[in-house]
C-alpha cells in the first residue's frame, strides 16, 4: 500500500494546498502553550462516547463538562478533572441528544437545566475564544484527524509551528466527536468515541 503522504494520493490539490498539507503532516504533536494546562494525564476514557456539552457551576461559576455515552451521563469539573456526578441509567426520554435542540437533562449541579450536546447527533462547540485563540480540525492523513490550536487570531497555516499554532491532538485510534471551547473560553475540549481530553486556562479580565 502507498504511504498516506504520497503526493500521488492527493491529485487535484493546488500547489498551495499541497504545501499546506505537507506542513500539517510535518508538525509533531506538542503540548498546548501557556496559559493552557492539560487537565487529565492525558485523557479520561469514556467508552461509547456520543457527545459533550458545557454548563456553568452555579456555586463557583466555573466550567462543567457533561459527557453523554452509551454507558450513561457524567459530569466533570473542567479545572480539576473531578467526576462530580454520574447517571448510569438516565431516563430513556433524555438519554441521547436526538431532540430538536440536541440537549439532554443536566445532572448533579446542573439538575433542572438542559445541556446542549455536540457530537454524533450533530451540533458544535465554539471554535474561537477571547485572547485570539482559535481551534481547527485538519486531516492531511485522513481518516486520522488533527486538532490545531492557534494564538493571536492566526490561522494554522501562518507563522511557525510551536510559536503561532500548535498540533495538540492527533486522533489515531478513535473518531472525533466534538472539538471546541466552552462559552466562557476557559476550557478547550476534544471528545472522541473513546475518550475526553481537556485543557483549562485562568480567566482573563477584559478591559472596557
Image (tube, grey):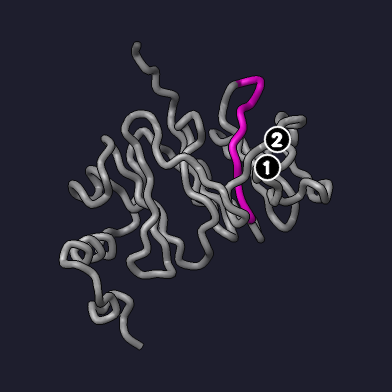
Q: Say left or right for 31 vs 197.
A: left
Residue 170 spot, x, y in % from top left: 41, 60
- Compare marks 1 and 2 and give the one earlier in the sequence: 1
Which residue sits at x=58%, y=39%?
81
Q: Residue furthest bottom?
A: 1
Residue extending furthest left? 15
Residue range highlighted in magenta: 50-60
Q: Are marks 1 and 2 in contact (CB under 8 Å)?
A: yes
| Viewer-nearest residue: 126 or 196 | 126
Say if 46 sits above or below 4 in the image.
above
Q: Which residue is mark 1?
A: 103
Residue 135 in which image quadrant: top left
Q: Secondary structure at mark 2?
A: strand
Q: Residue at x 51, y 58 (%)?
A: 176
Instruction: Give the vertical position of 189 relative to 200 (above or below).
Output: below
Cα distance in 3D space between marks 1 and 2: 6 Å
Characterize the magenta stretch by its predominant secondary structure.
Answer: strand
For the N terminus, the image quarter is bottom left
- Name the quadrant containing residue 53: top right
Residue labelled with disc 2: 114
Residue 186, position as x, y percentages in the image:
46, 31
One can see residue 41 in this view: no
Residue 53 forms part of the magenta stretch = yes
Q: Secondary structure at mark 1?
A: strand
* Residue at image point 26% right, 79% down: 6
Amino acid at each position: 500500500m502507498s504511504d498516506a503522504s504520497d503526493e500521488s494520493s492527493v491529485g487535484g490539490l493546488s500547489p498551495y494546498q499541497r504545501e499546506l498539507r505537507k506542513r500539517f503532516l510535518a508538525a509533531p504533536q506538542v503540548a498546548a502553550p501557556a496559559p493552557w494546562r492539560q487537565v487529565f494525564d492525558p485523557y479520561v476514557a469514556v467508552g461509547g462516547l456520543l457527545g459533550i456539552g458545557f454548563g456553568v457551576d452555579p456555586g463557583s461559576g466555573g466550567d462543567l463538562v457533561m459527557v453523554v455515552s452509551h454507558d450513561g451521563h457524567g459530569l466533570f469539573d473542567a479545572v480539576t478533572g473531578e467526576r462530580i456526578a454520574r447517571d448510569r441509567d438516565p431516563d430513556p426520554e433524555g438519554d441521547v441528544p436526538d431532540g430538536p435542540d440536541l440537549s439532554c437533562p443536566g445532572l448533579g449541579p446542573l439538575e433542572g437545566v438542559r445541556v446542549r450536546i455536540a457530537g454524533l447527533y450533530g451540533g458544535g462547540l465554539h471554535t474561537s475564544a477571547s485572547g485570539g485563540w482559535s481551534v481547527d480540525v485538519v486531516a492531511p492523513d485522513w481518516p486520522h484527524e488533527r486538532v490545531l490550536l492557534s494564538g493571536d487570531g492566526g490561522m494554522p497555516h501562518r507563522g511557525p509551528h510551536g510559536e503561532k499554532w500548535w498540533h495538540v491532538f492527533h486522533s489515531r485510534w478513535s473518531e472525533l466527536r466534538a472539538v471546541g471551547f466552552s462559552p466562557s473560553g476557559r476550557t478547550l475540549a476534544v471528545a472522541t468515541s473513546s475518550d475526553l481530553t481537556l485543557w483549562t486556562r485562568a480567566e482573563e479580565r477584559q478591559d472596557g
